[in-house]
Amino acid sequence: MTVPAPGSGRTPRAVRWRHAVTALALLLGLGASQVTPALAAVPALSPAPDRPVVVLGMTGVRWTDVDPATTPALASLAERGAVGSAVVRSLRPAACPVDGWLAVSAGTRAADTAWAGTDCRPLTAADDGTVPFWGDLVQAADAANFGAQPGKLGDALAAAGVTSRAIGPGAAVALALPDGTVAGGYAALGPDITSQVATAADESDVVAVDLGSVRTDGETDRATQVQEIDARLAAALAGAPTADVVVVSLADAGARPHLQVAALLGPGYAPGALLESASTRQPGYVLAYDVTATVLAATGVDEAVTGSPLRVAEDASATPAERFAALQDDARKSDVVRDLVPVYYVVFMLVNLVLYGVVSFGLTRWQGREARPALTAVRTAAVAVSALPAASYLVNLVPWWRASAPGVVVALLVAALTAAVTGASLLAARRWGLLAPLGVVAGATALLLAVDVATGARLQLASLMGTQPLVAGRFYGFNNTAFALFATVTILLAVAVASPLVARGRRRLAAMLVALVGVVAVALDGLPSIGADFGGPPALVPAFAVLALMTAGIRLTWRRLLAVGAAAVVVVGGFAVVDWTRPPAARTHLGAFVQTVLDGEVLPVIARKAEQNLANLVGSWFTVLAVAGLAAVFVALGRPLRHAARSADGGSLRWLSAGTPLGAIVHAVPMLRPGLIALAVAHGIAFLLNDSGIVIPAIGIAVAVPLLLATYAGWLRDLPTAESAAA
């Protein structure tokens, strides 16, 4: 207990409250002092009334299809304009041709949901000026509950007096009005493509051209189909020499998704760069429905859509050949990682289950044997398991996906990196004591994620536990998996930092350090310019506030918990509102959510996220492993440890603790219980608020439990034996 100085007039209760207020002030001050707008997006297109906008669309064409000898028009894009990879994910893993053109029409993800994979609806001509299957598309959009409005682009252009022309069936879908009629008229792609495009560009402000599709089930081989599209592209480009031209492949060729070709060229652009958009914040990556925002921006039409205008990323140091090679490398990386992600997660969860099983078995079957070697092995194995996530990110520093056997190479590299982190953690324990392994692994993982997110999230992109381009979920900031890791390791880092101070009675300093870790964690996670995570701060703020209160020795009451909840709402609301005040094209999904609320469309968003959360809970193979992990923790490990902790001499586990009560670890690690409560708060709230649902606590458990086991094993290992105690 803290004793007030004579004459100070401060009671111990007042001192503790002051400590708590100091900690909470640091955390809540984030809303006023740390919220800064994200970097302003570089405008891609300024309205140019004298220049038409021509969209040359196709489907199924990838950068790996492009060769200067056989596809010269496609190959020339890397020299003539800005190039990138288009992510065409619709409402299912692979996008059909109709899906891609419909995404341009709606300005967001959309799909003809009655068709999937290789069995795609054929694009048929709108000879009578109306898309023949339009009613099906509207019905599919309504059923999907994704907020897609087929015909949004055509309607916005027509309302603004912008003239348009559709050439080919896909283009008709893109420029159709909400009733399915094609604004500005429709024409089939003729034999003289150059003249046809030139005439349309002279007469219209916006021209969309469907150059055809490459399909895995096509009548000719893939190379021939690509060469035919390349010839049409060359002819179309010749017809639009003074136009701003978007070249984009909008859908996949079959049931397997791939990155597609995208380019932006014309008089308004200096050639020799990579494409990007505010949707991805990643040089070389754009979304299919960014095309919609690009057309609207180029024509000066103010219409809110999900995508962002294409823009040029500075890339003056690279040659066209280097840009071309980089895009092909990105394509290979995304394809290879996609196949290995499920394998990695299965291995990660299985090694956790094996660890729990071995420890549970050992608690009851190793009695009578020397405990120290077993505890050393448990601590080493547990630290190694907890180091796997950090290794899975670090491995992307090496281009392992280029190897002839990438799965073998990445497995060896992850194992080597895991061993290195484990070795460093155990060496640190010799100098800094019991909590060193927990602190080193948690601190290293937190630092790795923080630096990566703050510098563009390049390590996370297409990594084993990171963001997957082909999924098109998140390209920057903290996705749900990264958040689960970050929340877990930052809380554990705070525990490691605060525990020694609390043990020495320095609760005020400990609470301030906990609050400082919390402020930094919330800022990195929630700022639109860094983490841009809407669902993270509502979980982190209460977790760190509770941890700071308990560190300061303040009892939790309903009034204080409600104040913590209100603080979380204020912080998250501050992030979102500040982001919303920026121009629509520069907003992240934080500001977009505010706009969704103002538009009265928040209920479908909540329903969709709840549906996804439920689907993850009851229909995912990952959930099976997560539930098994939870069962292993609470049944196989929790029961014997709980019984032994209540026993004065260690109970059935006295052979491990030399007669010391297992509950005595709280004297060595006084922040253990507060840390567990903070973890439960963070993961419980995140489970309810995020569409990943059960995945978040599962990932957190898979890191936290091994680290806690390592700490327990290290404590037991260093207890004096019965013989040494007697001596």
Image: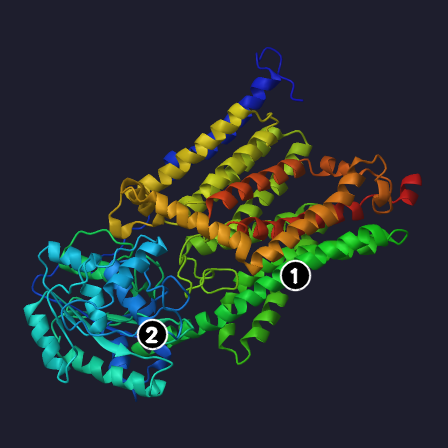
Q: Position of residue 350 (x, y in %)?
A: 65, 61
Q: Quadrant of residue 598?
A: top left
Residue under the image location 69 percent in, 49 percent down? 633
Determine which residue is flagged by label 2. Answer: 323
Q: Position of residue 199 (x, y in %)?
A: 7, 75
Mark 1 closeness class: few <14, some 14–19, many ≥20 residues within 10 Å: some
Q: Is residue 188 above or below residue 542?
A: below
Q: Nearer the viewer, residue 119 or 718?
A: 119
Is residue 246 shown to the viewer in this render?
Answer: no
Q: Quadrant of the C terminus?
A: top right
Q: Position of residue 625 (x, y in %)?
A: 62, 57
- Is 358 positioned to the left or the right of 95 in the image? right
SS of the residue at dot 1? helix
Is residue 542 shown to the viewer in this render?
Answer: yes
- Is 52 positioned to the left or the right of 726 in the image? left
Name the residue type under label 1. Answer: Leu
SS of the residue at dot 2? helix
- Is 282 positioned to the left or the right of 245 in the image? right
Sequence order check, earlier mark of 1 and 2: 2
- Is 597 positioned to the left or the right of 419 in the image? left
Q: Residue 678: which disc?
A: none
Q: Quadrant of the N terminus?
A: top right
Q: What colour scheme has been applied to the protein in the rendered image? A: rainbow
Q: Quadrant of residue 351?
A: bottom right
Q: Is residue 490 above or below residue 176?
A: above
Could you give the CA–CA distance between mark 1 and mark 2, rounded to whole angstroms? 40 Å
Number of marks in picture: 2
Q: Nearer the viewer, residue 661 or 446?
A: 661
Mark 2 closeness class: few <14, some 14–19, many ≥20 residues within 10 Å: many
Determine which residue is flagged by label 1. Answer: 350
Name the residue type under label 2. Answer: Arg
Residue under the image location 53 percent in, 81 percent down? 404
